[in-house]
Image: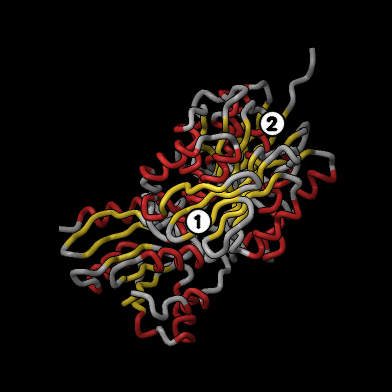
């Protein structure tokens, strides 16, 4: 009798749960591990799944008989236990790679620093409108492993692929790959911008001349990525007329390639607002058009797609003040885009877990903006206050303790006709499990206001 294969999963958040379910379903013996000894909701998530629980133990002590390790995206590939596993000949991969190996679909993938979630959701809707059986998975909140075994030939997986996830890829192949933009982020994990960019560029691994790459022409780092892939390259630009792709002319989004040029849609007909969302719409449109989806299906979706939860999401208006949830704003550049989208005087709630970001450029963009006050909280509070002092904005800042205190303080500072914007420019992990939980708590607090 052939001996069953044994896998170790390190890190038991959503991706770890998905990996455990998939591997047990296809006949692996599975050991689960996490540095925490107790994880809320894990027993319920793995109810009926036959795995060996080894929480709180050193992963190296669990290597016996293991031929595959699947690690959480928050674990750098440079940690000592990964190096030890590779030294012993044990393969180490990420959850995206695992899901890909057991999927039968074509992968359409989006990466970059900001806009990934909106692009992924929008691209998925365009493919569905265009008649393709589509799964929308990845960093958007549903692990690829959750649905990999359901996919069939001809299906499409539209996947948000963060650099943290791409780092663990080996055989992964994106039939179509799009890159939104690159700005400083996750330096607590990668250490340098060079390693961060290199992880993003793994989206092009194994592409061929029959594949598609969609790149932001206005971002020099992204534009230069064309040299990394043999795929057919499309560009999108708000500033220049590109030779192959989408660009803006007199308020109309124009498609052009070697054989044709036609107007796709008037920019003001795209439902999701803001210049950054125009870029997101162009990227999503090119991924779809490049994969054979009709221009009519693209237009229909652009006119109706409402955006995604936690990204410049209107919550409600109370006492003439509009409350906006941008909890997805987890780095300074994302918050810059949110501030630029504001049409009212704005009180900004800023701060959270420290990803080693620099906030000086964020404060530079406050000049000439509608910002009227800043409420600061979280692990980065002092760092932000120090930056505010450097940039002459300390008088705008109000330091608070708890998250509820911050929202209450913002409410006091705002006057009728103003907006309160939660766009922290930081991760949520100092106070919350994830940015979704942070945004949901913000909405709960605001919905209690009378």
User: Which residue is outermost to the top?
Assistant: 1
Q: In the rendered view of the protein, which quadrant contains the C terminus? A: bottom left
What residue appears at the point 47 percent right and 68 percent down from the top-left corner?
379
What residue appears at the point 62 percent right and 25 percent down from the top-left corner?
24
**Who is closer to the viewer here, 307 or 265?**
265
Instruction: Identify residue for label 2.
Output: 101
The image shows residue 186 at horizontal and vertical percentages of 60, 61
Query: What is the distance, in whole Å, between disc 2 and disc 1 at their CAs?
Result: 31 Å
**Who is closer to the viewer here, 263 or 146?**
263
The image shows residue 285 at horizontal and vertical percentages of 52, 45
Circle number at residue 15: none
**Marked residue nearer the N-terminal end (2 or 1):** 2
The image shows residue 194 at horizontal and vertical percentages of 71, 64
Q: In the rendered view, does 292 fall on the left or right side of 204?
A: left
The image shows residue 57 at horizontal and vertical percentages of 65, 44
Q: In the rendered view, does 342 fall on the left or right side of 317?
A: right
Q: Can residue 324 be seen?
A: yes
Secondary structure beneath label 1: helix
Circle number at residue 279: 1
Q: Coloured how?
A: secondary structure
Mark 2: few/some/many CA within 10 Å (<14, 14-19, 20+): some
Q: In the rendered view of the protein, which quadrant contains the N terminus? A: top right
Q: Can residue 56 be seen?
A: no
Q: In the rendered view, does 387 fall on the left or right side of 172?
A: left
Mark 1: few/some/many CA within 10 Å (<14, 14-19, 20+): many
Secondary structure beneath label 2: helix
Could you say which quadrant of the image residue 168 lies in? top right
What residue appears at the point 62 percent right and 22 percent down from the top-left corner?
153
Front position among marks 2 and 1: 1
């Amino acid at each position: 009798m052939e001996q069953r294969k044994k896998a170790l999963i390190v890190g038991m958040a959503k991706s770890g749960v998905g990996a455990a379910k998939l591997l047990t379903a296809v006949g692996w013996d599975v050991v689960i591990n996490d540095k925490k000894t107790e994880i809320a909701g894990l027993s319920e998530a793995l109810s009926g799944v036959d795995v060996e629980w080894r929480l709180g133990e050193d992963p190296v002590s669990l290597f016996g008989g293991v031929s595959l390790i699947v690690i959480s995206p928050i674990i750098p590939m440079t940690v000592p236990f990964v190096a030890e596993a590779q030294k012993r000949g044990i393969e180490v991969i990420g959850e995206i790679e695992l899901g890909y190996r057991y999927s039968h679909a074509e992968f359409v993938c989006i990466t970059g620093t900001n806009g990934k979630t909106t692009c992924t959701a929008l691209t998925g809707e365009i493919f569905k409108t265009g008649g393709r059986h589509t799964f929308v998975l990845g960093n958007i909140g549903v692990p690829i492993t959750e649905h990999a075994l359901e996919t069939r030939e001809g299906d499409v997986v539209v996947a948000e692929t963060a650099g943290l996830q791409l780092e663990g890829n080996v055989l992964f192949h994106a039939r179509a790959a799009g890159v939104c933009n690159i700005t400083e982020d996750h330096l607590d994990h990668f250490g340098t911008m060079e390693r961060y960019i290199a992880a993003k560029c793994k989206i092009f691994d194994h592409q061929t001349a029959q594949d598609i790459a969609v790149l932001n022409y206005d971002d020099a780092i992204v534009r230069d990525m064309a040299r990394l892939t043999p795929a057919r390259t499309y560009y999108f630009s708000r500033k220049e007329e590109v030779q192959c792709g989408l660009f803006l002319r007199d308020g109309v989004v124009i498609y052009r390639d070697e054989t044709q040029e036609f107007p796709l849609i008037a920019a003001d007909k795209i439902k999701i607002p803001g210049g950054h969302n125009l870029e997101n719409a162009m990227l999503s449109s090119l991924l779809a058009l490049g994969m054979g989806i009709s221009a009519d299906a693209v237009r229909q979706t652009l006119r109706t797609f409402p955006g995604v939860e936690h990204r410049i999401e209107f919550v409600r208006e109370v006492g003439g003040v509009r409350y906006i949830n941008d909890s997805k704003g987890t780095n300074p550049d994302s918050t810059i885009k949110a501030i630029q989208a504001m049409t009212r005087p704005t009180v900004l709630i800023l701060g959270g877990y420290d990803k080693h970001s620099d906030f000086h450029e964020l404060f530079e963009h406050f000049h000439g903006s509608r910002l009227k006050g800043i409420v600061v909280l979280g692990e980065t509070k002092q760092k932000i206050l120090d930056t505010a002092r450097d940039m002459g904005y300390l008088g705008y800042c109000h330091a608070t303790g708890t998250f509820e205190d911050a929202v209450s303080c913002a409410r006091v500072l705002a006057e009728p006709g103003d907006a309160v914007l939660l766009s922290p420019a930081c991760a949520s992990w100092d106070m919350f499990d994830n940015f979704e939980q942070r945004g949901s708590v913000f909405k709960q607090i605001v919905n209690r206001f009378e």
